[in-house]
Structure formats: structure tokens, C-alpha cells
Image (cartoon, helix red, strand yellow):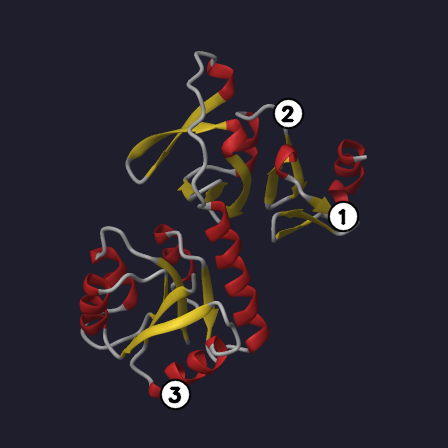
């Protein structure tokens, strides 16, 4: 089944660029093109959309404000000429943030990132509940307390004053430091591979001398962490 894409941008040339890029992927199809958020809302209400390419700076309502109106938005790749909204975009768990003009290799990387997340969202058996408090922690995000089972945490990365926790089917942005988050996790399962990355060693699918892979996600290994990392992996 093909991935259904919607392009939203008020610049015809920007839409054309994304169209040409999407034509290179046989498993992606363009459902519609819109030049405003108002038009896009109607399409999303009437059609099933898997992946939304969304410009930020648009007339009447910005892409960020548009996302706030959606209760169950599709996966989103933001496309913009401005880098100022990068941190704000994490609130919406966007797949990627592409800055115009968008080179194809960067676009290709964003599509691969979407596909890896899409694979992770495949139905999984519901784990049995456990009375052991050592198998999970609680974190606060979006004004809620979330119960995180250790085995479902793939990796975490730091984003300024926040930690973005990547789970099997979603991610959470938590206001804390990576060091403080690391202290709450079992040391024999989670390893710091970079000053900005912490990974679940059970989730690692491959590694080289310079990076670790979790599925199609590549995570760099910091020079000062290599000795410790390879002591665990070898």
C-alpha cells in the first residue's frame, strides 16, 4: 500500500520541487496539493493522509498554528525557509524539519526517517503488566505523567533544555537533562554513546566504529565515549 502524501505550501515553485522529489519514490503518492492551511484542513477531513509536507510561513494561519488545530494529525515533515521554528516544532513530534532550498539528499534522508518510524508503528502485542517498579519509570510531558517501560525506550537525545525520548511508536519531549534522565535508567541496559545521545543497548541492530544503528536510525558515537561503548558491544 502506498503512502498517501499531502503538500501544503503557498509557493507554487516549492510545491513543484516536492512533487518532483516524491515522483522518485514508487511507494509514495500525492493525494493533493494545497496553498493554504484552510484548504489542507478540508482535505485531511475528507481523505486519509499518511504524510503531510507542511510549510510554516503561510498567509492567515501558520503551519505551526495549523498543527495545533489538528486532534490526530498525520506524520509531518516541515518545509520552511526559516530555521527559527525548529525547537517549537518538537512539540508536535514532527518527522523532520527541512530548510529551503531543500537538496534531494536531505529530502531522501527525511523520507527514510519517516519510513523507519512508520515501521516502528506497526501493531505490536500488548506487553503483560508487571508489578515490578524496576521495569518502568514515569516522566512528565504535555501536562501528563507517562509510564515508560524500559524495553520500549529505543534512545533519547538532548534538545537544549529538553530530552526527546524515542519510543517504539512515538516520542516525548521532557524538560530535563540527558544526565538526569540517564540516572533513572538501568545502567546495564542503557549506554551513553554521545554527549547528546543515550541508547537502549537491546535495541541496537548494527554498529560501526563511528555510529550505532537502531533500525534505519543512525546515532553517532562520540570520541570520548568509544572505549566505554565498545566495551559493552564487544
**Is the residue 114 above or below the residue 17 in the image?**
above
The residue labelled by disc 3 is 13
- Whether residue 53 is visible to the viewer of this picture, yes or no, is no
Of the image marks 1 and 2, the number of the one nearer the N terminus = 2
Q: Nearer the viewer, mark 1 or mark 2?
A: 2
The answer for how far apart the CA atoms under marks 3 and 1 are is 42 Å
Which of discs 3 and 1 lies nearer the camera? The answer is 3
| Residue at the farthest bottom position | 13
Q: Dot 2: few (<14), some (14–19), or many (≥20) neighbours within 10 Å?
A: few
Q: Is residue 201 left or right of residue 40?
A: right
Spatial CA distance of label 1 from label 2 is: 20 Å
Compared with residue 126, is residue 204 higher up or lower down, i.e. above or below? below
Q: Measuring 54% from the left and 45% from the top, which residue is drawn there?
A: 157
> How far across and down, in percent of the image, does residue 227 sit?
80, 38
- Which picture quadrant has residue 14? bottom left
Observer-nearest of 178 and 218: 218
Amino acid at each position: 500500500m502506498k503512502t498517501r502524501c499531502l503538500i501544503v505550501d503557498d509557493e507554487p515553485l516549492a510545491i513543484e520541487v516536492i512533487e518532483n522529489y516524491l515522483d522518485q519514490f514508487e511507494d509514495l503518492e500525492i493525494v493533493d496539493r494545497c496553498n493554504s492551511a484552510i484548504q489542507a484542513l478540508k482535505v485531511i477531513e475528507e481523505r486519509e493522509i499518511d504524510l503531510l509536507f507542511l510549510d510554516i510561513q503561510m498567509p492567515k494561519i501558520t503551519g505551526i498554528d495549523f498543527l495545533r488545530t489538528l486532534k490526530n494529525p498525520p506524520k509531518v515533515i516541515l518545509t520552511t525557509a526559516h530555521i527559527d521554528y525548529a525547537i517549537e516544532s518538537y512539540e508536535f513530534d514532527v518527522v523532520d524539519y527541512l530548510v529551503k532550498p531543500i537538496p534531494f539528499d536531505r529530502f531522501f534522508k527525511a523520507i527514510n526517517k519517516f519510513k523507519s518510524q512508520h515501521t516502528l508503528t506497526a501493531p505490536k502485542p500488548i506487553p503483560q503488566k508487571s508489578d515490578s517498579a524496576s521495569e518502568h519509570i514515569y516522566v512528565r510531558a504535555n501536562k501528563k505523567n507517562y509510564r515508560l517501560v524500559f524495553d520500549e525506550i529505543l534512545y533519547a537525545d538532548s534538545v537544549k533544555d529538553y530530552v526527546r525520548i524515542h519510543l517504539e511508536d512515538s516520542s516525548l519531549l521532557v524538560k530535563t537533562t540527558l544526565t538526569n534522565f540517564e540516572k533513572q535508567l538501568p545502567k546495564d541496559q542503557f549506554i551513553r554513546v554521545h554527549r547528546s545521545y543515550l541508547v537502549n543497548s537491546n535495541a541496537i541492530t548494527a554498529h560501526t566504529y563511528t555510529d550505532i544503528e537502531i533500525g534505519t536510525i543512525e546515532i553517532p558515537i562520540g570520541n570520548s565515549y568509544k572505549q566505554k561503548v565498545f566495551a559493552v558491544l564487544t
